[in-house]
């Protein structure tokens, strides 16, 4: 079984982001970047499936600028066998990413695609669902547990009411949620070995896809600061303020 797993380069989750002075986006110059945490969970799950003997090859994929090689090398150090970078400077929206991944899936012919459920930079949570729709495959989103069989996979999903388990025929698309696993610490010897693993670079044109955008960012700004609260003497004063000042009742 071949597994294709996606990784995205984002601002590190420990970094507090700030908008650019002109409001055109988020400042990324001289900012620490790392692998999207949900994608890290996806890579870990793929590696565990391989270690259990249920997968034979793991292909890590990233789409973006040349610096995305950094997160691909991290995926290789975690246990992926080879990597593919679709290099582009274009602004990537979920549908565009899904179309590029669709072309890669047709090229690689994996049995299972695992993505992080969302990226922490745009929080769109759309790419996995769009990819499944484009491919005509089943999808198991927000996965907290995977049980892989011969021709199907059981996915335990986190939903508002608790947990839901669905059985999907392979090939299929799965998106990883926070509680699926805890990613391993990458050791130095594995980092050194990752430098020798193959990393292929493609362009969108190589996949027959033309980058295009459908959304325009008007402005990125800090949220307004919350005003300090006030204390009331008793319940009667609270009700009066809610009725007269806030107009909540």
Image: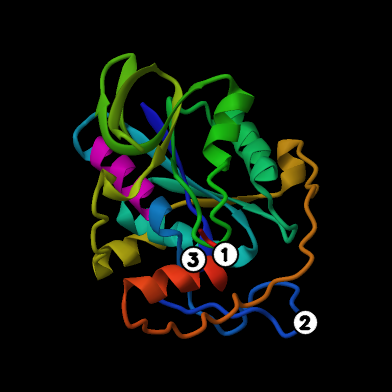
Range of the magenta residues?
A: 40-50
Question: Chief secondary structure of the magenta span?
Answer: helix
Q: Find the distance from the CA under tag 2 to the CA under tag 3.
A: 28 Å
Residue found 40% across the figure and 30% down from its top: 2
Camera-side residue: 246 or 104?
246
Which of the two discs, 2 and 3, labels the residue nearer the N terminus? 2
Residue 101 lies in quadrant: top right
Residue pictured at 57% horizontal, 64% vertical: 247
Find residue 95 and report its horizontal and vertical position in percent: 68, 41
Kindly report which numbered mark, 2 or 3, lies closer to the viewer in this rendering. Answer: 2
Cα–Cα gap, marks 2 and 1: 37 Å
Q: Is residue 189 left or right of residue 82?
A: left
The residue carrying mark 2 is: 22
Q: Which residue is mark 3?
A: 70
Quadrant of residue 58 within the rendered picture: top left
- Image point 43% across, 60% down: which residue? 73
Residue 13 appearing in the image: no
Residue 65 locus on image (x, y percent): 65, 63
- Residue 130 in the image, given as x and y percentages of width and height: 60, 33
Residue 247, labelled with which disc? 1
User: Along the line of sight, which residue is nearer the eye, 216 or 242?
Assistant: 242
* Label 2 Cα crowd, 10 Å radius (few <14 / some 14-19 / many 20+): few
Indicate the position of residue 202 as horizontal and vertical percent values.
66, 48
The relative height of residue 216 versus residue 104 in the rendered view (above or below) is below
């Amino acid at each position: 079984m071949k597994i294709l797993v996606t990784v995205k380069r984002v601002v590190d989750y420990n970094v507090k982001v700030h908008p650019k002075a002109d409001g055109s986006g988020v400042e990324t110059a001289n900012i620490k970047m790392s692998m999207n945490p949900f994608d890290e969970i996806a890579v870990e799950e793929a590696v565990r499936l391989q270690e259990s003997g249920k997968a034979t090859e793991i292909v890590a994929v990233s789409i973006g600028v040349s610096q995305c090689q950094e997160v691909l090398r991290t995926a290789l150090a975690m246990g992926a066998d080879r990597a593919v970078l679709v290099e582009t400077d274009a602004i990537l929206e979920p549908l565009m990413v899904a179309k590029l991944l669709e072309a890669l899936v047709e090229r690689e012919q994996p049995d299972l695609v695992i993505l992080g459920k969302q990226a922490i930079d745009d929080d769109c949570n759309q790419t996995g669902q769009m990819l499944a729709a484009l491919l005509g495959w089943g999808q198991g989103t927000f996965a907290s547990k995977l049980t892989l069989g011969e021709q199907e996979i059981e996915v335990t999903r986190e939903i508002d009411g608790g947990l839901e388990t669905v059985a999907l025929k392979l090939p299929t698309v799965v998106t990883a949620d926070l509680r699926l696993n805890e990613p391993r610490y990458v050791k130095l010897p594995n980092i050194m070995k990752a430098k020798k693993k193959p990393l292929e670079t493609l362009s969108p044109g190589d996949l027959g896809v033309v980058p295009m955008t459908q959304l325009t960012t008007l402005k990125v700004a800090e949220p307004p600061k919350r005003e300090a609260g006030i204390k009331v003497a008793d319940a009667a004063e609270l009700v009066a303020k809610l009725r007269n000042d806030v107009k909540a009742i």
